Image: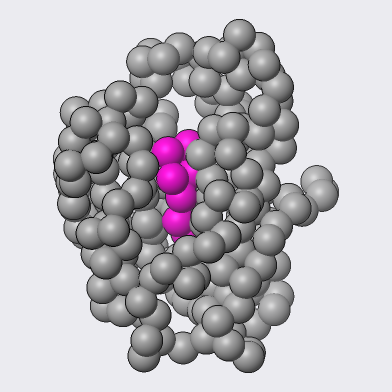
Amino acid sequence: MSTLLQTIEKETGANPSVAIIWMHGLGADANDFAPMPQELDLRGLPPIRFVFPNADTMPVTVNGGYVMRSWYDIVASDLGRQEDEAGLRASQLKVEALIARENARGIPTSRIVLAGFSQGSAMTLQTGLRQKDKLAGMMCLSGYLPIAAKAGAEHTKESLATPIFMGHGRMDPVVPLARAEQSRDALKQLGYDVEWHDYPMQHSLCQQEIVDISAWLKRIL
């Protein structure tokens, strides 16, 4: 059994009954989204445990083999033609170990949201589509559906009941809007309930997106 990923945890109240596992993007770390519990409007929601994991470090091909935190290798900047399937699946197991830890702490999978930005968003879909139990939700920010050709065969019937939030910048130079739209359409074709938003921004978050995420969390939780 591999060791659990390092995490930063923030709880919005005592005895949380909901967990949000929020994964950072390439080269960032757990600190990247740690301020989010203060930025979101969580009024009226039960206490939430936010879990911000650190991806392991690895050499990243597209960045000249430079070692950085990464959920999987990025082989080419087009993100699609050559994908690090082994790396995606290895990180999926590590995210599933974090879900299991929340289960052990008393939070059922149906009260866990997987969330992520960019690479973390890809990990949200990689992991969430393959769960044997319904999650509370999948939040995909500035990301895409990895190994999309296998999602049809590998997604579980149970995961179809998990609502998905997708937010993306119209001028994103890292993950092109068209790639995210293809991912959205593929998920809808599989039968997922996808709430889609695009924003006048690049590869980032904006205030309107934070407002929309807050509203979505209130609906699903």
Number of numbered discs: 0
Magenta residues span: 114-120
Residue drawn at x 48%, y 64% as measured from the top left: 36
On the rendered structure, is 185 left or right of 159?
Answer: left
Q: Would you say residue 17 is visible in this rendering?
A: no
Q: Quadrant of residue 200?
A: top left
> Which colour assignment does the render follow?
one colour
Q: With respect to residue 100, does 179 lie above or below? A: above
- Is residue 119 highlighted in magenta? yes
Tell me where residue 3 appears, x and y as whole percent: 82, 49
Is residue 210 found left or right of 64 in the rendered image?
left
Could you tell me which quadrant the C terminus lies in? bottom left
Q: Nearer the viewer, residue 126 or 32?
A: 32
Question: Does residue 165 belong to the magenta stretch?
Answer: no
Residue 207 percent coordinates (x, y): 28, 58
Tell me, yes or no, if residue 53 can be seen here. Answer: yes
Q: Residue at 57% of width from left, 14% of height from top? A: 63
Vertical placement of residue 205 versus 73, above or below: below
- Which residue sits at x=32%, y=71%? 214
Depicted 4 relative to depicted 92: above or below: below
| Side (left or right) of 172 relative to 57 | left
Q: Can you give x and y, in whole percent of width and height, for residue 31 in the image?
A: 62, 52
Vertical arrangement, residue 22 with respect to residue 175, above or below: below
